[in-house]
Amino acid sequence: MKIAIAGYGVVGRGAHELLLKNHAAIAARLGEELTVKYVLDPKDLTGTPGEGLKAAGIGEVLADPEIGLLVEAIGGVGAAYDYVRAALESGRSVVTPNKQLIAEKGAELLALAKEKDAALLFEPAVAGGTPVLWPIAHCLAANELDLAAGILNGTTNYILTKMVAEGADFAATLADAQRLGYAEADPTADIEGIDACRKACILADLLFGRHTDPEKVFAQGITKITAGDVAAADQAGFVVKLIGQARKMPDGKVLCLVTPALIGKGHPLAAVNDVFNAVMVHGNGVGEVMFYGRGAGDLPTGSAVLGDVIEAVRTGCRYDPMMSWTDCGSDHLADRRDYAIDALCRVKEPFAGLAARFPGAACIWERDGETAALVHGVPEGELEDYLAGRAVSPYIRVFAR
């Protein structure tokens, strides 16, 4: 099997380097050689493993009958979408870690893969080098799954871990993360929850079989989390994490969202710190299962890319109906405002006023004219409307399960 790699940055090059490093072992397990024949990237490849493999364009790659599979590691939905669609149209299989492409165009591309009976695999799109999607689709296939939730972004988890450990505010911790290379110069996709939202949508797609449009999913990042929020959470027995979740509600609707959330200190997700990711899945047979590991990096993500390549080749580069979903509109999606939540609130009013409005509220502190409290079983829309213009900082929901 000869493959082409489109995009030779951290992930594309990492996958190639790992293939060269473990070439003999991979060939022995697979029963045939895997070779990179072309690299598609505009930059100079001199001094890299891709030197001498540069293709003039996607046309040259797809005109070569020896190429059976394309690894797309460009990112985004511009050239990446064009290349993946062209490869599938030609009957080639595709492996991609591109979370934006799969979240936005996955249903369309999977329909094309089905038509052409070609593999389209994307394991690294959610948790990098940590296997999540394959185990959900295959190992847990005997279950009715009703929840996938977790820490889906290593950058924000690092920032929140430092805020908890040091009591620092968001801005200072973000600057530290950028200095260490954990956060990009433009960290918007991470800190505003956009990256985690795409991953949560893919989890929802796979669990429930229907396309979840990221544009219709509520995503709130961590930019407004303060040291005061972290301190109030700690005093109440929680830590703050950015949680992406896809869950089936009692009425059958699917709730997909990304928000900061309070995690009880004894919960397994509370112990996931720094740049690590974790995804918890619940099934009616297996109960709770958690997947934990590094969510980024050249060799960890390259490992997941090559794992998909090996699986595609092992199964004859055929379409996998268990790693698929369809686009049937958005009428299955729940409105978060309709459901009751428990939440941390910080307001500039006496606790007595808050307790009168929300019976059962529990005071964390009253100081300097501010009340921090936990409210219980309140419809989110009602809570949101009440706090508009009153809150010191946004309320933080308690993660349930």
Image (spheres, rainbow, N blue to C red):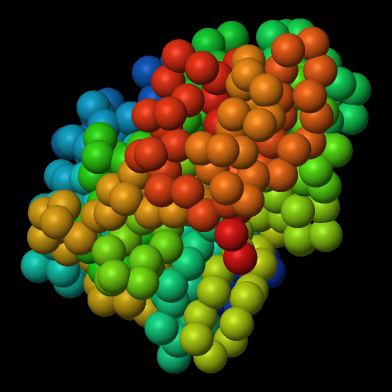
Q: Is residue 353 above or below residue 355?
A: above
Q: Quadrant of residue 66?
A: bottom left
Q: Position of residue 2 (x, y in %)?
A: 39, 56
Q: Which residue is drawn at 41% across and 83% down?
A: 144
Left or right relative to 186: residue 161: right
Q: Which residue is drawn at 54% across and 25% down?
A: 394
Q: In which quarter of the image is the C terminus?
A: bottom right
Q: In this view, does 244 lie above or below 331?
A: above
Left or right relative to 181: residue 64: left
Q: In which quarter of the image is residue 81?
A: top left
Q: For this rendering, which residue is in front, 236 or 360?
A: 360
Q: For this rendering, which residue is in front, 18 or 284?
A: 284
Q: Is residue 309 above or below residue 20?
A: below
**Residue 352 appears in the figure:** yes
Q: How many marks?
A: 0
Q: Where is residue 139 in the image (x, y as percent from the top left)?
A: 52, 82
Left or right relative to 202: residue 105: left
Q: Which residue is drawn at 23% across and 27% down?
A: 78
Q: In which quarter of the image is residue 40?
A: top left
Left or right relative to 58: residue 126: right
Q: Position of residue 112 (x, y in %)?
A: 12, 59
Q: Residue at x 45, y 86 (%)?
A: 143
**Residue 179 appears in the figure:** no
Q: Seen from this angle, which residue lies furthest right?
A: 166
